[in-house]
Image (cartoon, rainbow, N blue to C red):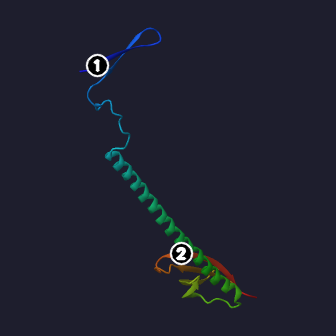
């Protein structure tokens, strides 16, 4: 059983304190503050989903940067070919030609099509630069007009 002790407090009242004879019970022990296994597993699942989404985003960003680089280089190839028509003082022959040009270590296939226009002193030039990975994919198309030199 319990043994009661009484003590006098300053207002003249008595306070009773009970001291148990047995060791501390489950209710009297301080409760340890921690996470349960379920809470830890839920937190790990949330972190895993967030990391998977972040890695997917980084992979897409890398792919986009590579695609952008190819398109910028294809723009240089198309510009070089069009400048070649302007620099040469020869009248371009109608028809299609194909070839490749290297830009920044990448070999780009291209196709140039020259067609006559209603004005006999002008020729329409269409330049298509294709992907080095697969020539069926067009990276850049540039259309211009070349005038006959007088």
Q: Kindly report the distance in space between the C-alpha atoms of the residues bearing marks 1 and 2.
A: 93 Å
Q: Secondary structure at mark 1?
A: strand
Q: Which mark is residue 3?
A: 1
Residue 94 vertical position relative to residue 20 in the rendered view, above or below: below
Q: Position of residue 126 (x, y in %)?
A: 59, 80
Residue located 26% across and 28% down the image: 22
Q: Quadrant of the C terminus?
A: bottom right
Residue located 31% across and 17% down the image: 4
Residue located 59% across and 77% down the image: 73
Q: Is residue 62 visible?
A: yes
Q: Position of residue 53 (x, y in %)?
A: 43, 58
Q: Position of residue 33 (x, y in %)?
A: 38, 39
Q: Quadrant of the N terminus?
A: top left
Residue 10 vertical position relative to residue 42 in the rendered view, above or below: above
Q: Which mark is residue 139?
A: 2
Lower sequence index among marks 1 and 2? 1
């Amino acid at each position: 059983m319990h043994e009661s002790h009484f003590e006098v407090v300053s207002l003249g009242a008595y306070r009773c304190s009970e001291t148990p004879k047995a060791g501390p019970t489950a209710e009297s022990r301080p409760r340890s503050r921690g996470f349960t296994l379920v809470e830890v597993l839920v937190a790990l699942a949330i972190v895993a989903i967030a990391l998977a989404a972040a890695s997917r985003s980084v992979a897409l960003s890398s792919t986009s940067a590579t695609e952008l680089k190819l398109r910028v280089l294809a723009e240089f190839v198309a510009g070089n070919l069009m400048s070649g028509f302007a620099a040469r003082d020869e009248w371009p022959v109608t028809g299609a030609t194909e070839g490749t040009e290297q830009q920044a270590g990448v070999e780009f296939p291209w196709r140039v099509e020259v067609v006559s226009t209603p004005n006999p002193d002008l020729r329409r030039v269409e330049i298509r630069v294709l992907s080095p990975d697969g020539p069926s994919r067009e990276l850049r198309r540039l259309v211009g007009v070349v005038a006959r030199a007088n």
